[in-house]
Amino acid sequence: MALTGVEIFKLLPKTNCKKCGFPTCLAFAMKLAQRQASLDLCPDVSEEAKQKLGEASAPPVRPITLGSGDKAVKMGEETVLFRHDKRFVNPCVFALEIKDTLAEDDINIKVNEVIESEIDRVGQKLRIDAIAIINDSNDAVKFEAAAKVIATKAPGIPVIICTVNPQAAEAAIKQFADEKPIIYGVNSGNAEAMANIAKTYKAILGITASSAFGGSGGGLDEISTLTEKVKSMGVEDMVIDSGARKAKEIIEHNTLARRAAIKKNFKPLGYPVITFAQREDNLVELLISVVGVAKYSSIIVLSSIEKWKNLAMFTLRQNIYTDPQVPMQVEQKVYKIGEPLPESPLFITTNFSLTYFIVSGEVENSKVASYLAVMDCEGLSVLTAWAAGKFTAAKIAQFIKEAGIENEIKHRELIIPGYVAILSGAIEDKLEGWKVTVGPREANGIPAFLRSRMAGK
């Protein structure tokens, strides 16, 4: 059971030293009880208290890292049911299935698709994160051979080893030593053997209900029994699969598991969820994946990763796992679009990520190298920042003076967004010797605007 704020307070030093950032130990205890602070913030807490509070203050959904190195992905660590309550922490993982019945050339093609899946969207690198190796042949030798191909072709990419056969699992996992893969397919019959393999190779276990393989298992009840059994064998890191495959079941099971973990602190279901979305129809597969992204799946396994499908999934994931209380922002500075010369135009806009990437994209489309001054307005768009008093003539003038752009350009002309044309006169008053030109109201007008300027010179 979760401890109350008063129960936690009794275990704290009670010095009110404020080192944790809170005014009193009681205030800190209340934040710990609400899972809005970490026990690590208290430098004076005793080891005995750490042991007692560690479990109580841990996130309801266990944090787990799949893979190692710079391609490793974090899962779990979630503390809320709804993102507007706080925020969702670790974006779900997309994995491409690769069956061991495929020819080596076909396996290489699929691995290449994963390697080449990365795109840049509003400043974030988005990609297919992992590979799920499926023991479709039920043959340990074939499974090991497929694992070798993938390990050679895609070093560092996190893997999920999918088999109910402990011998096949051990043969495959040897190819990914010290890379913290998942061994998926742990059931009541093979749990002990799989747990021993996981402990030997420092792997994560994927706990499955028998209904995942067409049986008539008990879903979440069966899973909660299995996770407790596996935990008693010395394995802490697990992901769970209740066997849900239809959209209705995925929503129902994932929601029940998340609610049990967060509202009831029910540890046997407090693990990241893996969802298998594979379908013959690509559109249906996408829709099942969307359900998983929206409703608590930490891993979604796909049968194919066409670019159009990836873009839809990446965009949804990025939006859901963005803090709704903190706008996406880019760094305040003067960006070079293309290879601008001292005579090149100088634009200004705010640091809202979407604004920056739309404006910079349209400048790139114009083929006219330019400077783009991006001003920190706390991630607000142009009109919102102006209305909030953060994109004003005085602040714009101060930013331009402090940015040092005057040392890089020969002219003294600043192009402002058309929506704030009203600022042009005031900016010229604040920026002595400068001319302010009003640009297009919409970013898609920038190419024509720049071409007309070039034609007039």
Image: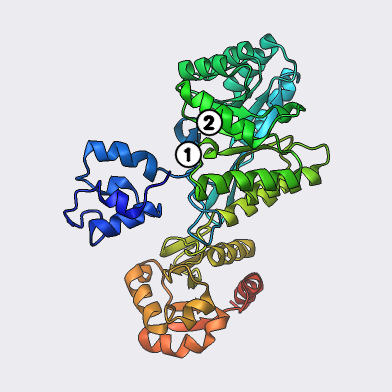
Q: Position of residue 302 (x, y in %)?
A: 70, 37
Q: Quadrant of residue 30?
A: bottom left
Give the residue at x 20% y 57%. Answer: 18
Q: Position of residue 258 (x, y in %)?
A: 57, 46
Q: Amino acid at mark 1?
A: Arg
Q: Which mark is residue 238?
A: 2
The quarter of the image holding the C terminus is: bottom right
Q: Which mark is residue 188?
A: none
Asked if residue 177 is positioned above or below residue 76 in the image, the reply reads above
Give the residue at x 67% y 15%. Answer: 143
- Judge from the rendering whether residue 171 lies leftward or rightward of residue 330; answer left or right: right
Contact between marks 1 and 2 (CB within 8 A): the answer is yes
- Pick the residue in front: 191 or 99: 191
Question: Residue placed farthest to the right in the image?
Answer: 281
Q: Could you tell which of marks 1 and 2 lies nearer the N-terminus?
A: 1
- Pick the residue in front: 247 or 136: 247
The quarter of the image holding the N terminus is: top left
Give the residue pinned by disc 1.
62
* Circle 2 SS class: strand
Can residue 291 be seen? Answer: yes
Can residue 109 be seen? Answer: no
Q: Position of residue 419 (x, y in %)?
A: 57, 82
* Circle 1 SS class: loop
